[in-house]
Image (cartoon, helix red, strand yellow):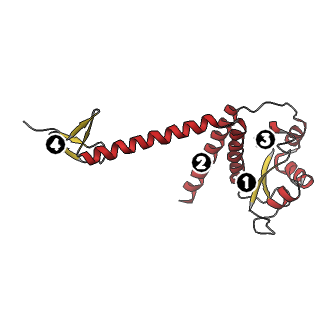
């Protein structure tokens, strides 16, 4: 009678079923593989538990901050091939500090309900966004040219306030991270 061969759950090598070590419906070729497999599993469980614990202890403002970071990264990536919306500069021309910010036409303090609205946010140089308080006059002129007068009127007149919950912020974070990944994949395919 022919003996069965089984695959080790850790190193994936084939070995005779007579020589394997059985543990919790899994086969292992040696005790070393069994030990390293169980260590890796417990380490994954520990990491998962720590991740869940951190998620439970995050406050609403932590979730909003993470969502804002994901949204800003997406906007900078979306507008990577256009200059600053306010002054028209490209990177390196009189740069202050970093390269680019995500500038909001109506600030997140005055219009928190437009914080994650894509018409309200565009790539802006650090000088305009941080040192000129968003350069609103030039921003408005360029915004009308870019998205049109009706959309600018909507942004300026929108006053409906909605509370941003932690769940909503988590959803926004997932959406904009996924949008950025999809656009990066498309660009990488075009380059090849």
Whether 178 is drawn above or below 142: the answer is above
Q: Nearer the viewer, mark 4 or mark 3?
A: 4
Q: Position of residue 17 (x, y in %)?
A: 17, 39
Q: Nearer the viewer, residue 135 or 53?
A: 53
55 and 135: which is toward the camera: 55
Residue highlighted by disc 2:
181
* Residue 96 can be seen in this image: yes
Q: Residues within 10 Å of mark 2 (few under 14, many from 20)?
A: few
Q: Nearer the viewer, mark 2 or mark 3?
A: 3
Q: CA distance from mark 2 to mark 3?
A: 21 Å
Q: Could you tell which of marks 4 and 2 lies nearer the N-terminus?
A: 4
Counting residues from the N terminus, which is met first, the one under dot 2 or under dot 1?
Answer: 1
- Of callouts 3 and 1, the N-terminal one: 1
> Which residue has dot 4 on it?
19
- Cα–Cα gap, marks 1 and 4: 60 Å
Q: Earlier in the sequence, mark 4 or mark 3?
A: 4
Closer to the eye: label 4 or 2: 4
Q: Dot 1 corresponds to which residue?
A: 79
Secondary structure beneath disc 4? loop
In terms of secondary structure, where does tag 3 sit? loop
């Amino acid at each position: 009678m022919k003996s069965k061969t089984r695959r080790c759950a850790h190193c994936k090598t084939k070995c005779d079923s007579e020589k394997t070590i059985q543990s919790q419906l899994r086969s292992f070729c040696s005790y070393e593989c069994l030990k390293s497999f169980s260590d890796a599993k417990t380490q994954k469980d520990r990491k998962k538990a720590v991740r869940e614990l951190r998620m439970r202890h995050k406050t609403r403002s932590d979730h909003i901050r993470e969502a804002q970071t994901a949204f800003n990264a997406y906007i900078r990536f979306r507008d990577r091939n256009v200059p600053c919306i306010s002054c028209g500069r490209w990177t390196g021309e009189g740069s202050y500090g970093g390269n680019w910010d995500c500038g909001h036409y109506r600030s997140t303090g005055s219009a928190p309900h437009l914080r994650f609205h894509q018409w309200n946010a565009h790539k802006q140089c650090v000088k305009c966004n941080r040192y000129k308080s968003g350069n609103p006059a030039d921003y408005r002129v360029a915004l009308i040219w870019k998205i049109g007068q009706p959309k600018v009127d909507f942004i300026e007149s929108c006053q409906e306030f909605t509370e941003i919950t932690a769940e909503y912020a988590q959803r926004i974070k997932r959406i904009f991270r996924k949008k950025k990944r999809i656009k990066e994949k498309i660009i990488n395919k075009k380059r090849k």
